[in-house]
Image: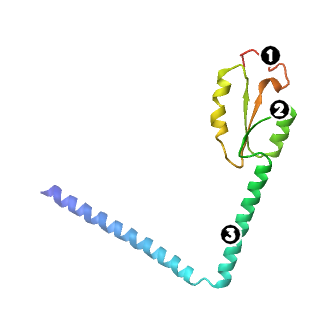
Amino acid sequence: MEGNGSIDMFSEVLENQFLQAAKLVENHLDSEIQKLDQIGEDELELLKEKRLAALRKAQQQKQEWLSKGHGEYREIGSERDFFQEVKESEKVVCHFYRDTTFSGNLMEPPFQSQKKFGTNFTKLEKKTIRGKKYDSDSDDD
């Protein structure tokens, strides 16, 4: 029977804690509602203008990214084009592949499905890169 008494006491303490937390949240919400009720027309217009400016800026940024090729998975034809792409974008994911290997084709579907703006997804065949290591078609990397 003593176990039931401690469970009842624990339940009561827990209930009081939940009640206090609910009252704090309710008071906070009431104060926020009161602030919103006191906002004047001028303040609402100011908030609206700020929001519209932020939306315009986001749309402009998206258009800039689209013009740079973001949102699509493209192949880069030369090493020079690769460096130009990297310079224009803050974030770039480039898939270096070789047509002669199966593993190079495994990465195609995940990259093709990327429609993220802000990151440029590209691919470049290894044989287009100058340099001694990549001039051969051997499978050793």
Residue 136, image x and y in percent? 80, 16
Give the residue drawn at x 76%, y 50%: 66
| Residue placed most toward the observer, 110 or 12 | 110
* Residue drawn at x 68%, y 79% as measured from the top left: 45
- Between circles 2 and 3, the one closer to the viewer is 2
User: Which residue lies under the disc numbered 3?
Assistant: 51
Placement of 11 over or under 118, stated as above or below:
below
Q: Taking 55 as reference, is 33 left or right?
A: left
Kind of residue at badge 2: Gly
Residue at (84% x, 19% y) in the render: 132
User: On the image, numbered disc 1 is attached to which residue?
Assistant: 136
**Element on which disc 1 rests:** loop
Mark sitting earlier along the chain (1/2): 2
Q: Which residue is mark 2?
A: 77
Cα distance between the residues tagged 2 and 3: 41 Å
Mark 3 to mark 1 CA distance (whole Å): 55 Å
Residue at 70% x, 49% y is 117
Up/down of 15 relative to 70, above or below: below
Q: Residue 67, percent across and down?
A: 80, 50
Residue 101's place in the image compared with 50, above or below, is above
Mark carried by residue 72: none
Q: Looking at the figure, which quarter contains the N terminus?
A: bottom left
